[in-house]
């Protein structure tokens, strides 16, 4: 056992300084001198050394825990992820319809917003991985038509069906597709017809103003890389990066108390088996953006409309949805990875609170 250092020695002076400055705890002094805790305390008192508890000295552990190894932080290097295909849903434009908040000028302005807002999202994601290809679904009711049984009555339209197609919708959409082609390697457009384009109740179902618009776009002279796929049936099955998409308008599902979610699930489950399965379904018709998990294998996107204050939405669904369209990315392994509801008119953006 060591003795307490003698006065007037460097060892004593150093010990006294460390104890009074709170550098060493009483237990540390005892360990350093090889003395018991009680004897060390008495010796400090006898030698007139005032003990001060050290600052921020850890208490004795209750359990001896092995030291935790912390790896040094290394910032991640920026890397390019796997390429994805971007998808854009267009539908329920009802070109030429007149409502309190919609007319042909508003239609053209919102077409411009489709391009600008969609491409903004594209450029954001291109900072993370390549997006070279764009797939567009045109989901029907692209023009309002002229069938009074589908809402096209006097005062609700400015021109007839043929002029709606060739004077308004065709040049607007051809310009939109050409602008997208300047920013994507390929632009593929898959189309289905809606209910508002029906010529009459007695006419064949292919006699539809939507079909006229799609075939005009298909036959038109376009930049290379734009491909139009007009419909042969009420639906189209499209494979994107290995995942099947089931596209249809949505009027096949009867409305009851707003959007009939239960009826939609039943329809999608039936179509899933009849069409040999699909991972995603895309539709319009209900003028409100939404999505539904039909089964563990099927997710459905309900696209918003471009038209606003439409009597159909107000009377049948009970709401006037905001003008918006879905856009999302599709990865070859993970399927749909991100989604945005693109608002097409700044007046319908949410207002921040004053808090």
Image: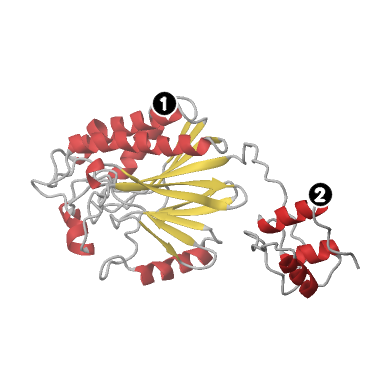
Pick the residue in front: 340 or 92: 340
Q: Which residue is mark 2?
A: 10
Picture quarter with the N terminus: bottom right
Q: Which of pointers 2 and 1 lies earlier in the amino acid sequence?
A: 2
Residue at 25% from the left image edge and 70% from the top image edge: 257
Q: Position of residue 144 (x, y in %)?
A: 22, 46
Q: Is residue 299 visible?
A: yes
Q: Is residue 340 left or right of residue 201?
A: right
How far, Cα to Cα, is label 2 from label 1? 95 Å
Question: Quadrant of the rendered structure where residue 137 is?
Answer: top left
Q: Secondary structure at mark 1?
A: loop
Q: Position of residue 90 (x, y in %)?
A: 36, 44
Q: Which residue is mark 1?
A: 222
Asked which colour scheme the image uses, the reply is: secondary structure
Q: Is residue 334 left or right of residue 3?
A: left
Q: Position of residue 251 (x, y in %)?
A: 31, 59
Residue at 65% from the left image edge and 37% from the top image edge: 77
């Amino acid at each position: 056992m060591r003795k307490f250092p003698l006065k007037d020695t460097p060892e004593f002076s150093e010990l006294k300084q460390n104890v009074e400055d709170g550098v060493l705890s009483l237990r540390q002094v005892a360990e350093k001198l090889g003395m018991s805790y009680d004897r060390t305390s008495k010796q400090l008192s006898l030698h007139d050394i005032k003990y001060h508890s050290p600052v921020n000295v850890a208490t004795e552990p209750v359990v001896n825990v092995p030291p935790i190894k912390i790896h040094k932080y290394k910032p991640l290097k920026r890397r390019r992820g796997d390429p994805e295909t971007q998808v854009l849903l267009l539908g329920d434009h009802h070109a030429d319809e007149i409502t309190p908040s919609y007319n042909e000028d508003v239609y053209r302005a919102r077409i411009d917003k489709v391009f600008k807002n969609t491409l903004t999202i594209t450029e954001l994601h291109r900072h993370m991985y390549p997006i070279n290809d764009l797939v567009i679904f045109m989901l029907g009711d692209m023009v309002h038509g002229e069938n009074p049984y589908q809402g096209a009555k006097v005062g609700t339209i400015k021109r007839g069906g043929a002029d709606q197609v060739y004077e308004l919708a065709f040049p607007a959409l051809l310009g939109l597709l050409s602008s997208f082609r300047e920013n994507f390697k390929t632009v593929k457009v898959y189309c289905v017809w809606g209910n508002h384009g029906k010529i009459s109740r007695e006419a064949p179902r292919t006699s539809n103003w939507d079909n006229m618009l799609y075939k005009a776009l298909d036959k038109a002279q376009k930049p290379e890389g734009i491909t139009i796929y007009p419909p042969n049936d009420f639906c189209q099955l499209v494979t994107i990066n290995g995942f099947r998409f089931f596209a249809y308008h949505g009027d096949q599902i009867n409305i009851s108390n707003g959007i009939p979610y239960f009826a939609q699930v039943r329809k999608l489950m039936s179509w899933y088996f009849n069409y040999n399965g699909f991972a995603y379904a895309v539709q319009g018709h209900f003028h409100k953006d939404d999505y539904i998990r039909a089964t563990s294998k099927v997710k459905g996107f309900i696209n918003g409309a471009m038209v606003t204050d439409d009597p159909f939405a107000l009377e049948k669904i009970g709401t006037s949805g905001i003008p918006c369209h879905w856009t999302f990315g599709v990865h070859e392994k993970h399927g749909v990875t991100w989604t945005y509801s693109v608002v097409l008119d700044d007046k319908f953006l949410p207002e921040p609170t004053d808090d």
